[in-house]
Image (spheres, rainbow, N blue to C red):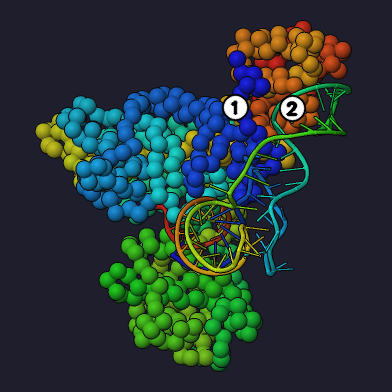
Amino acid sequence: MTLLSSYFLPTEREPPADAEAISHQLMVRAGLVRQVGSGLWSWLPAGWRVHQRIVQIVREEMNAIGGQELLMPVLHPAEPWRRSGRYGIEELFKLKDRRGAEMVLAMTHEEIVTGHVGAAIQSYRQLPLILYHFQIKERDEPRPRAGVLRTREFIMKDAYTFDRGPEGLDAAYEKHVAAYDRICDRCGLEWYRVEADVGMMGGLGAHEYMAPCAAGENEVALAAGYAANVEVASADPRPVALPAGLDSPQLIDTPGLTTVEQLSGALEVPPGALLKAFPVVLDDESMRLVVIRGDHRINEIKLRSALGGEFRTARREEVQARLGPPGFIGPVGAQVPVLLDQAVAPGAYVTGSGRVDAHLRGVEPGRDFSYETVDVRAVMAGDTINGSELRIEPAIEIGNIFKLGTRYSEPLGATYLDESGNTELIWMGSYGFGPARAAAAAVEQFADERGISWPRTIAPFDIQLVVLGKPGSQERELADRLYRELQEMGLRTLYDERDIGPGEKFADAELLGCPLRVTVGPRSLAAGEIEVQVRRGRRSLTGPVAEAAGAVAELWQGLP
RNA sequence: CGGGGAGUGGCGCAGUCUGGUAGCGCACCCGGCUGGGGGCCGGGCGGUCGCAGGUUCAAAUCCUGUCUCCCCGACCA
């Protein structure tokens, strides 16, 4: 029995003052979640139903590809984390037990699951394996935000695959691609599978599942047949009209002009006809000069992978000592290796000269300086890929899949014996999915000015049955009967039989966002009809009372 | 970590500058009316003003310290 009069669904007329994101506002207002602390949230009954429905979809699809569900603890000894080299991560919560033993609160479970598999697996005959669980993750986020979108504690489905080698890993990865595609579809979300950064730990390949929405913290670059996180995206630049070439670079006076805007204005050339030079210093203190088009920006993640490691921007005195006055440096005559972005087409450019208050024009890469080509610029809207224009959208990362290779099996010693009796490392993959983020993404994507509009597959209830009429009235009698019939047909029904005004009931129903609202009131009763509102689009329908339950069930089946 | 803002009843807020013992709307409780879009009338309950210390005859208000939360950025393997 789910009677709204006794259901813990504390709705609010106004959003919390500090809520910005739509999903944050609506999930609180609709009574789905409540905040406990920064980045810490309780799921109230209706919200938890949504979460559980998403979990069940994920579980079914994981089982369908041969996944085996288990459960590992949140609290770990520090030791395996030291062995894997992850103990130093700042986001990792660390604590001590009463005996002073160092412990961690897990942010994922590679160390533990690899330990179990390494201990239990001896032979190639025991591989491959897919293990997964739903478990709380703890992360000491520098900045939790936007309600349930970025929290310090959250439930994640994390799966781990164990294979004999790279081919096995590829196959396991492909299974997860298929499973994740189905999960996102079944959750009723708009989503993209995008190429992703493999991150600091290296890795052999990664994709992220992104749900586009305004509150998203990530940006995805999209074109026909292309989808990538902007962190790794690559595209053809908009061409730029370059001035005619010169026989050799010509020095020009540019007193006090140090920015692209100033130069471009003063010289009457487009910003893209300039080259910007960024001096960076690598871990070994050696310097590189990164050169990109004047209208472009550096993508630090792409630059990091191009450099093959960490870097920092050069300090003023380093620039002064090795390249010339800051604001006027350029690649011509530079005494450090030049990395030229691939978006710089052949032609004559304006660059720094290495002298105060002067630039060079007519500079041609190759002729006037030598370089190594790199791809380090941030893509921008209007770039193209195979002629198709690129657009950039904000999105929430709801899942990620990652080829780990031997990143964990090696330090943790997870090996097996192959057919020839040789000891080999197990090849692993890891695959995360966040039900809370999927729920928030659904709220973001389908909400309207009245509230939430859940996809049918993850709504807290299928039907919100609203009765308008006092206890004991005919309307009540009919609604009571309809409630039983809907339940008998397997429809999850929330029955609003509270003794309050119709406006409040309708407002609450539209706020909570179940796919269908069925109304029984004196008006419809007199006409021998019941009234149904489809939440998505707020379309209203009526039908005869007699076959109401069956008709509603059929209507529900056809909803998104 | 840098910048900005906020803690006053369940929620949203005023009061703080200029010190005088806390108020509004909604919600909640009781009674009545109403009954298809958060309705109306009457009567009520509820707050050590984040916490600690200080100044003062007197502190939500002034001073010091501290905790918490939010937003932007950095960060988020």
Q: Residue furthest left?
A: A421
| The quadrant where residue A168 appears | top left
In the picture, measured across the screen, residue A270 lies left or right of residue A172, that is right
- Label 2: which secondary element: helix
- Mark 1 residue type: Phe
Left or right: residue A16 compared with residue A95: right
Q: Is residue A52 left or right of residue A503?
A: left
Between A170 and A200, the one nearer to me in the picture: A200
Quarter occupied by the N terminus of chain A:
top right
Q: Which residue is mark 2?
A: A505
x, y percent for residue A399: 46, 40
Residue shown at the point (39%, 76%) measured from the top left: A314
A40 lies above or below A311: above
Write down the residue under mark 1.
A8
Q: Position of residue A200 (x, y in %)?
A: 34, 55
Residue at the image point whose x is 53% and y is 29% from the top: A48
Tell me where residue B62 sits by quadrant: bottom right
Q: Amino acid at mark 2?
A: Lys
**Up-down: is A552 above or below A316?**
above
The chain under label 1 reads: A
Measured in 3D between alpha carbons, the distance from the residue under mark 2 to the one under mark 1, in whole angstroms, is: 15 Å
